[in-house]
Amino acid sequence: MAKKRVSRREKKPELMPQAGGQAVIEGVLMRSKRFYAVAVRTPKGKIIIKKGPVKSQADRFKFLKWPVLRGFWALVESMALGFKGLDYSARIFEDGEKKPVKRGKKRVKISKAKQKAKEDFAMAMTYVVSIVIAIAVFIYLPVQLTKLLAKAAPALDESRTLFNSSVVTMKFIFFFLYVWGISFMDDVKRLFMYHGAEHRAIYAYEDGKSITVKNMEKYRTMHPRCGTAFMFITILVSVVVFILLLPPHYSVLKRVLLELPLIPLIAGLSYELLKYSARHQKNPLMRLFIAPGMAFQRITTKVPDKKQMLVAAAALNAVVAMEKKKA
């Protein structure tokens, strides 16, 4: 009896359509649509894994799955999960570095609840200050400098295209200089190495290979769905959105106040483009489109060592195991 021919559509679907992640302090966070895992190497060399379900409000409120809006909401939830992973890795790293404080023969004991409250408050203040600085450097300053340039070159203040292109170009320059500058810091170098390990693990999974160090070593550290590539896409999208919606004659303060509400739109459109470009990355035009983001990853990713790849593999294997159990 002849064997039935199986079409591509009849093939069993992948366990996880896509895997994603990010580097954290001495570790890697990996996630699927339903689960996440954070693997961190302690100062003593042990790999600790925290894992759990991913709870999305989009499952409760269906309108959050609408095109463009789903992209912005996915970004919000990814950032929230990323902060959670960073906080977890920081606590593990700090706990491993802490030494008991002695006063005579007695140790000074601090209530864990009070200590956690202090740490949470410090973390919250750090995020608030970071947001304020980001708005000042990446929104206010580019507009202010473009306004100053317009005094010497009036054509800038008369053209939507020239004015907004100048603003976005300055944003890119500031972003590039910031990332390039911090890349020389030892802690950031290690973070970028874990970033490279994360990408190698995802490549191995996407190729259907076992997620092991041996298999991961074959892959490059740059990935088309990386957040770095996303940043470059937002630059292109923001130029178009600003030209369409923001004329050059607004005051600096008004301009800043109007840019902030446009962030969801820009993020949502950029998300859709990122997903599309990742699905069609073999297309010559798409390769050209994602090339700048891939090139910039030569700064934001570094070649990881075997221990770092083991951490990335542990995180992704934990997510895959949860998906298999749920299937």
Image (cartoon, rainbow, N blue to C red):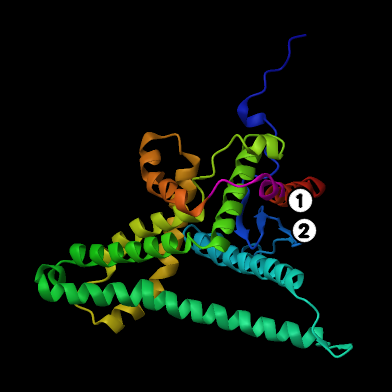
Q: Residue 277, image x and y in percent? A: 45, 44
- For the residue pair 309 and 123, the one nearer the viewer reads as 309
- Residue 54's disc is none
Residue 74 visible from this viewpoint: no
Amino acid identity at mark 2: Ile
- Closer to the camera, 249 or 106? 106
x and y percentages locating residue 247 in the rendered image: 22, 72
- Please tell me how crowded label 1 is: few (under 14), some (14-19), or many (20+) other residues with Cα within 10 Å: many
In percent of the image, x 60 and y 47: which residue is there? 304
| Left/right of residue 70 with respect to residue 31 in the rendered view | left
Pick out the residue farthest to the front: 104
Tag 2 secondary structure: strand
> What is the quadrant of the N terminus in the image?
top right
* Res 31 quadrant in image: bottom right
- Would residue 290 be visible to someone looking at this image? yes
Say which quarter of the image contains residue 115.
bottom right
The residue tagged 2 is: 49
Q: Which residues are magenta?
A: 302-310
